[in-house]
Image (spheres, rainbow, N blue to C red):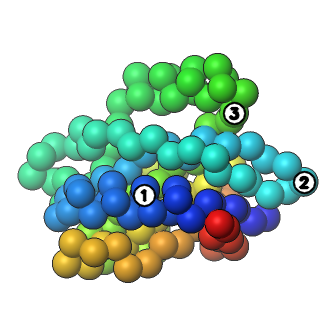
Amino acid sequence: MSVTLPTNLQAEIFKQMEATYPNEGGGFLLGDIRQGVTHIVDVIGVENVFETEEQYHRYAMTPQNWSKMEDEADARGLVLVGYYHSHPDSPAIPSVYDRDHALPNFVYIITSVQNGKAVDMTCWRLRPDRTAFDAEQLHIQA
């Protein structure tokens, strides 16, 4: 499978992730899935509610955030297709913590933010058996 992300939404994710540096930031990916391709049409940032002293390497949101986003997606005729977050001063690859807290079938976009600047973006999907993430093709489109 592959994922499409408009350039303006990539820029929005970069802006959000740079603003949360040196802590992790994140949010939801809304879109649709057609012919095996996940199309992201909106990104919505969500405040990091992890313990303050751990936010430099952890990101969390509340169950209420999930519920609200599912309702918003439904109201807009979209689907909650995934989640994005940053890795401050670390590579844009999933951690063991990411794997342990991920859901199969969701798209996970990770942005590496080095010294306050977004420098890399990758896309992943958790295997159904939860043993690992597989890289997804991420197509940035105008």
Q: Amino acid at mark 2?
A: Gln
Q: Quadrant of the N terminus?
A: bottom right
Q: Quadrant of the C terminus?
A: bottom right
Give the mark nearest the N terminus, 3 or 2. Answer: 2
Give the label on residue 35, or none.
Answer: 2
* Dot 1 alpha-carbon crowd within 10 angstroms: few under 14, some 14 to 19, many 20 or more: many
Q: Amino acid at mark 1?
A: Ile
Q: Which residue is mark 3?
A: 78
Q: Which residue is mark 1?
A: 13
Mark 3 near mark 2, Cβ–Cβ under 8 Å? no
Q: How many marks?
A: 3
Q: Is residue 109 visible?
A: no
Considering depth in this image, is 2 or 101 the residue closer to the camera? 2
Distance between the Cα atoms at labels 3 and 2? 15 Å
Give the mark nearest the N terminus, 2 or 1. Answer: 1
Examine the image and state in which quarter residue 138 appears.
bottom right
Q: Amino acid at mark 3?
A: Leu
* Dot 2 alpha-carbon crowd within 10 angstroms: few under 14, some 14 to 19, many 20 or more: few
- Element carrying mark 2: loop
Considering depth in this image, is 107 or 98 the residue closer to the camera? 107
Residue 118 falls left or right of residue 28: left
Picture residue at 75% right of the left edge, 65% below the top: 2
| Residue 83 in picture, x, y percent from top left | 51, 49
- Element carrying mark 1: helix
Give the mark nearest the N terminus, 3 or 1. Answer: 1
Picture residue at 45% right of the left edge, 49% below the top: 101
| Residue 126 in picture, x, y percent from top left | 62, 59
| Residue 36 in picture, x, y percent from top left | 85, 56
